[in-house]
Image: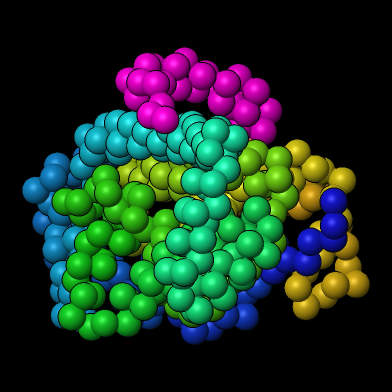
């Protein structure tokens, strides 16, 4: 395993302020929104007028206008946890079913191409010649660049592109209400489920997205080399939603509504998997390459900090989300990859029968 030089930062579930740019440490970022999307705490009148039960009913959620955007605050209806749990289970299962179909279709396509090339060499040559004639110069350059990428970079590139696109959408003022509603998780909001997934591709600050994408790029090669691109994608997507669910549970129990967004929950799943799979790999901090430490020690320190944050109620970072993603990564390393992933063969068999024999 090569030396992985990594900078891991983390921002919080409530506010991302410019002063947090100096907080770089051995952890992953799952941020709350920037200072322009500050979450309004419950007003004094709202607190005085609500009842004193552990969880207030849904009617006590107080929509608050911040920077012209309505943000739902107040107490959280605990019954929404069941909706989040069902969505998490359904989405994670669907993710692995989807990547299993992708894996099957890729193998099927390659097998058919090989078969056709043996049956009709002239047909294959004519087809390739026709493709070359239609291909424009820019596509040739793009194809050449893509072929030079490592397997990890090929899966990292589209994920990074999606994150950059969503980051650009945050810069459009007219889309701000939509972005807050669907691309930031908030258990007090009406829209609970899909933001759990969409928020994993969402970053508001430039430093946040740069740090997260750097960490993902650093660890994606080792993870894809071990898992394969299909299994990697299933783990990445599932870890992100499971991290959002962990955040929902923590906010509901502690009665702390607030926006959270960022890819750090998903990245923590990949980081925990790689660090557990290759515990002796030497890591270093980006700006301090002279100090190295083992991957096994790094993940223990990171999870220890997040556990302390959960127990002590630190609110700068979304520690519950980080722990959720990391625990899933550990689960997949020690159990899921060997016992859960092989189960896809049963579903792939049904899919093969549904697809029928390939056409020659």
Q: Residue at x 31, y 75 (%)?
A: 169
Q: Nearer the viewer, residue 307 or 27?
A: 27
Q: Nearer the viewer, residue 161 or 22?
A: 161
Q: Residue furthest left?
A: 59
Quadrant of residue 48 in the image? bottom left
Residue 242 locus on image (x, y percent): 44, 41
Asked whether residue 161 is in view, the answer is: yes
- Say whether residue 333 is magenta: yes
Asked whether residue 9 is in view, the answer is: no
> Count the marks: how many?
0
Q: Residue at x 63, y 41 (%)?
A: 228
Q: Residue at x 20, y 67 (%)?
A: 178
Residue 1 locus on image (x, y percent): 85, 51
Q: Residue furthest right?
A: 290
Q: Classify residue 304 as left or right of residue 163.
A: right
Secondary structure, magenta segment, majority class: helix
- Say whether residue 357 is magenta: yes
Q: Classify residue 145 as left or right of residue 65.
A: right
For residue 159, above or below residue 286: above
Q: Nearer the viewer, residue 69 or 120?
A: 120
Residue 113 locus on image (x, y percent): 53, 39
Residue 167 locus on image (x, y percent): 39, 74
Q: Residue at x 37, y 58 (%)?
A: 199
Q: Classify residue 56 as left or right of residue 81.
A: left
Figure quadrant of the C terminus: top left
For residue 23, above or below residue 57: below
* Residue span colored magenta: 331-360
Way the structure is coloured: rainbow
């Amino acid at each position: 395993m090569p030396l992985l030089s990594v900078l891991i930062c983390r921002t919080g579930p409530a506010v991302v302020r410019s002063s947090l740019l100096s907080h770089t440490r051995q952890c992953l970022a799952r941020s709350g929104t920037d200072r322009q999307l500050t979450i309004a705490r419950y007003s004094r009148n709202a607190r005085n007028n609500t009842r004193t039960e552990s969880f207030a009913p849904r009617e006590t959620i107080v929509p608050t206008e911040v920077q012209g955007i309505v943000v739902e605050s107040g107490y959280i209806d605990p019954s929404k946890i069941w909706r989040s749990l069902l969505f998490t289970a359904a989405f994670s299962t669907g993710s692995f079913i989807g990547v299993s179909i992708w894996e099957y279709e890729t193998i099927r396509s390659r097998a058919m191409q090989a078969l056709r090339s043996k049956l009709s060499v002239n047909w294959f040559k004519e087809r390739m010649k026709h493709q070359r004639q239609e291909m424009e110069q820019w596509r040739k350059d793009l194809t050449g660049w893509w072929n030079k990428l490592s397997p990890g970079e090929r899966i990292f590139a589209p994920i990074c592109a999606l994150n950059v696109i969503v980051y650009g959408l945050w810069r459009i003022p007219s889309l701000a209400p939509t972005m807050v509603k669907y691309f930031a998780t908030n258990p007090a909001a009406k829209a609970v489920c899909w933001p759990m997934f969409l928020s994993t591709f969402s970053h508001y600050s430039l430093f946040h997205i740069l740090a997260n994408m750097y960490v993902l790029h650093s660890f994606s090669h080792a993870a894809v080399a071990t898992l394969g691109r299909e299994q990697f994608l299933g783990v990445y997507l599932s870890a992100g939603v499971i991290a959002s669910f962990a955040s929902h549970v923590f906010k509901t129990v502690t009665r702390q509504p607030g926006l959270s967004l960022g890819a750090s929950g998903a990245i923590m799943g990949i980081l925990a998997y790689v660090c557990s799979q290759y515990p002796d790999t030497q890591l270093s901090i980006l700006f301090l390459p002279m100090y190295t430490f083992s991957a096994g020690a790094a993940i223990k320190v990171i999870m220890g900090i997040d556990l302390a944050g959960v127990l002590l109620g630190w609110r700068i970072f979304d520690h519950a989300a980080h722990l959720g993603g990391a625990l899933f990564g550990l689960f997949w390393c020690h159990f899921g990859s060997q016992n859960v992933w092989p189960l896809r063969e049963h579903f792939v068999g049904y899919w093969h029968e549904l697809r029928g024999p390939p056409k020659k």
